[in-house]
Image (spheres, rainbow, N blue to C red):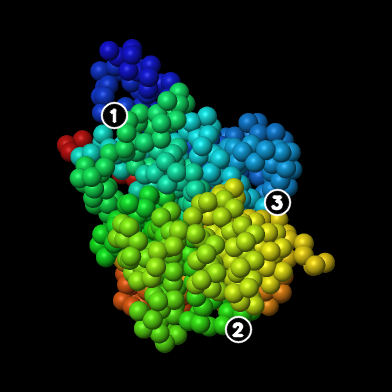
Amino acid sequence: MFSNISKSLLCCTNAIGPNRALAYALTKCPALLEPSLIQCRNYHEVTGDIICPNMVRGIDHLRDPRLNKGLAFTLEERQALGIHGLLAAKFKTQEEQLDICRISIDRYEDNLNKYLYLVELQDRNEKLFFRLLSENVEKYLPIVYTPTVGLACQRFGLIYRRPRGLFITINDKGHVFNILKNWPEPDVRAIVFTDGERILGLGDLGAYGMGIPVGKLSLYTALAGIKPHQCLPITLDVGTDNQDLLEDPLYIGLRQRRARGKEYDEFIDEFMEACVQRYGQNTLLQFEDFALGNAGRLLAKYRNKYCTFNDDIQGTASVAVAGLMAAVRVTKRKLSENIYFFLGAGSAANGIANLTVAAMVSEGLTIQQARDRVYMFDVDGLLSTRREGGVPEHAKAFGKNIEPEKSFEACIAKIKPSCLIGCSTVGGAFNENVLRQMAKNIERPVIFALSNPTSKAECTAQDAYNFTDGRCIFASGSPFPPVQYDGKEYHTGQGNNSYIFPGVALGVIATATHHIPETMFLTAARTLANYVSEKDLNIGRIYPSLSEVKEVSLAIAIEVAKMAYDEGLASVYPEPKDISKHVSSQMYSFHYESSMPVVWDWKPEEKFNVRPIQPVPKNI
């Protein structure tokens, strides 16, 4: 028995210092062997914000991505840590390393290869990865987020290397808390989780959907400075109804049909309860890419019990409403003076519509007056109470007592909307006829093609300008290249949720907010809209440049934090005298820190006449 166990223990190259000593002692004295004492750490040696120097070996600074600085370790650090000679002789600053990273990633032509390079960089040098991403947001955001993350999810079985979160399956029902305890980081403040049923516009990807919470939480850190160890991505694997995945030899999830009904609901209940049991009631729980049948009802079920939000509903709504608010400065029409027409009546469309209604109410309309200005069109046609089958339950508020109509183009001509918002994932649905009709309806039509990825967008930016005689105000969910029209170049805005959710999350975490009301997303929308400059508007952009998203996130976080205290939602007491300073103090540093232990001098001892040592009497 001893030979088998001791061999396992001694072969563990990741064991922390005391365990190495124990392993040596056990080889000398087998009788001391206790199975309960044999521990092997295969993950980060460091947890939380505090590094315990006597628990971290010198070589751990190279193996742990949270500690690794590559060739930036100084000569003093290399010698003191015992890693001198394990690195090449050249010293390179973090800035020099960033230049090498940029050159390396630019050598790849395929975006999926660029994604893999960034994933591997995060695996070996965390600070370098987040600084590279945060300082090159416009360039690398489409790689770690939409649209490339969609391709990464589709290929997840092929590119999966090592865990970057938890997979909790329906078979673990009754033991969810035990699995959460397996995560080695105790200081988790934000959890992004998905069941993989509606990944972007790609549908049911099951366990392959893990790429989405991983990507979202990377942006939590890169765009809002939320500390990476405080973030936990989770996939709730309840099976998949995607036949291709069930037959895919590379698939990494449960090979079974999706659990639904009572079993599914009990599983989600247990998960939510286990999260707050493990990490506290103020843990931020973000729903991500749940299907229409579950997204809205689960949000309604949990929003007043937990610190939770659904990014596809509320984050999308906030960024879209921010765009509508910014467009007011171009159209000179108040929000309450527009007619809104949605293609798609799912969770995203309803989220945008509800927040738009709230914004119109703040301008003086009643709720019903505001809802009367919102129309929706789904796969069965115009949302009319007179149509066969009526209006879906989740969209009842926007059903109209008018004649049914199944022609989208006919509805555009009849209703004459001034704002057309696409949430359908039907690529090209805003065709030439639709766009030309929008141009007839009003002088400055607002066209939002928000579906992701790019192939699912309702129209391209170029088509929107071409078929509205260059008069449209356009935004999309995925990025489009600059538009050339009538001798002028336009840089259209991307209505990306990354403008909203990192800042909201930072404000919530910094104040330990216990609930997230809908008005918090309206506050975020106003803050984002106010950040749009006249220069942005002049080049056709109703969102600030993505290069400014870190500043936007901080501004949103500060406003969210102020609102949390004003509304009695915060639990950090006493209330900070300077909210801005308090929020900033919670943020992650992207720069390398010294690996040397802190040393200090003591004051000189006082002078005393010390007696000589006396021999101990023999009779004692």
The 10 Å Cα crowd at callout 1, few under 14, some 14 to 19, many 20 or more, is: few
- State the residue in front, 71 or 483: 483
* Residue at (53% x, 73% y) in the render: 416
Q: Position of residue 297 (x, y in %)?
A: 29, 57
Q: Which residue is mark 2?
A: 332
Label 1: which residue? 37
Q: Which residue is mark 3?
A: 95
For label 2, the SS is loop
Neighbourhood count class around disc 2 (C-alpha, 10 Å): few under 14, some 14–19, many 20 upward: few
Could one spot residue 491 in this view of the protein? Answer: no
Whole-angstrom CA distance, mark 2 to mark 3, is 46 Å
Task: Name the foreground residue: 77 vs 242.
Answer: 242
Q: Residue 289, can we see it?
A: yes
- Indicate the amino acid at tag 3: Glu
Name the N-terminal-most of marks 2 and 1.
1
Q: Position of residue 247 (x, y in %)?
A: 42, 25
SS category of the residue bearing label 1: helix
In which quadrant of the rendered image does the N terminus lie? Answer: top left
Q: Is residue 4 left or right of residue 315?
A: left
